[in-house]
Image (cartoon, rainbow, N blue to C red):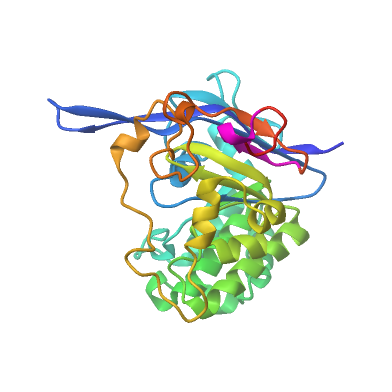
Amino acid sequence: MPQTVISVKDLSKRYSLGSMFKRTKIDALGGIEFEVKSDEPTIVSLIGESGSGKTTLAKLMLRIVEPSGGSMEVAGKKILAGKKERIRDEDLKALIQPIFQNPFEAFNSLKSVDTYLRDTAVNIRKAEGKDAIEKAMREALMAVGLRYEDVAGKYPNQFSGGELQRISIARAIIARPKLIVADEPVSMVDASLRMNIVNLFKSIRDEYKTSFLYITHDLATAYYISDYIVILYRGRVVEAGDARVVLLRPLHPYTKLLLNSVPAVGQKWSSREKMSDIETKEYRLEGCKFCTRCPDRLPECERSQPPRVDLEDGRAIYCFRYRGDGKAK
């Protein structure tokens, strides 16, 4: 029977922006939901432009911030729920490990990087004794293509961005987590090394049986790496399903816009092709957050949130045009 990889139910996060005398409330996440079940470890990609809520979801999953409402489960464990229902903070670290966008910000420049590896082996992996601790470090570094002897005693400034990101990955897998949350992990790595990092994720999924939440705006790597995909816009899920199904045959107007905005090989994004700046008025719309930019909008799109429609190909789409029998109207 398929097991729950990630389950998100009515998850919301509201922020207040502006001065003390003029506050604006923004729903960075507006009651989103999706569920991924599988017999195998799975790479789930979360895609959307800046301001879509991707990083907010990652922070909630890691409990860096608290939700305004809703719940979340990872590998059948309650991450976000009532205080008495959810797992303890120390158990959360063993269940979920992060990989952040900027590897240089993940390490203190005054501490050697192997200190972080050792702390993870001792405090989360619960390795005991010098030999067991060093073995855990060696195995993790070998998995990402590095040698313990080339890392031990060195500081962050002695490594390239790509090497340091590999050390971040090694640190995460020492804990043997069920899920790794990778927030834009290749955006600050040289283009020539991006596929190496992405291939590492696939090998870790297969070798360590670890699932990933891969957060990105890079559709090319998402297509290559993903098993399942979730498209976000202004804090709402607009389309979700099997990665090949969604990316090869997009249905939601926003998903289509994202794919059409990807430049061809040798081209650069022009200012006209880039997504528009974040506008708070879109967050505050009562209806579909995309309706002001949608070429196919209906009158009801402006008045209420679109319903979830489950299609025969397994995807979920939030759009009034697919209500009823699941066919576009």
Q: Can residue 114 be seen by looking at this rendering?
A: yes
- The quadrant holding residue 130 is bottom right
Horizontal side, residue 232 vs residue 16: left or right: right
Examine the rendered structure and indicate whether residue 34 appears above or below residue 250.
above
In the foreground, 200 or 125 = 200
Residue ranking furthest to the right: 1
Q: Residue at x 64, y 75 (%)?
A: 145
- The quadrant holding residue 24 is top left
Horizontal side, residue 41 vs residue 294: left or right: right
Residue ranking furthest to the left: 21
In which quadrant is the N terminus drawn?
Answer: top right
Q: Residue at x 63, y 35 (%)?
A: 322
Q: Is residue 61 magenta?
A: no
Horizontal side, residue 92 vs residue 52: left or right: right
Q: Can residue 170 be seen by looking at this rendering?
A: no
Q: Residue at x 47, y 56 (%)?
A: 100
The span shown in magenta is 314-323
Tally of marks: 0
In the foreground, 9 or 132 = 9
- Image coordinates of residue 6 in percent, x first then y, are 66, 38
In which quadrant is the C terminus drawn?
Answer: top right
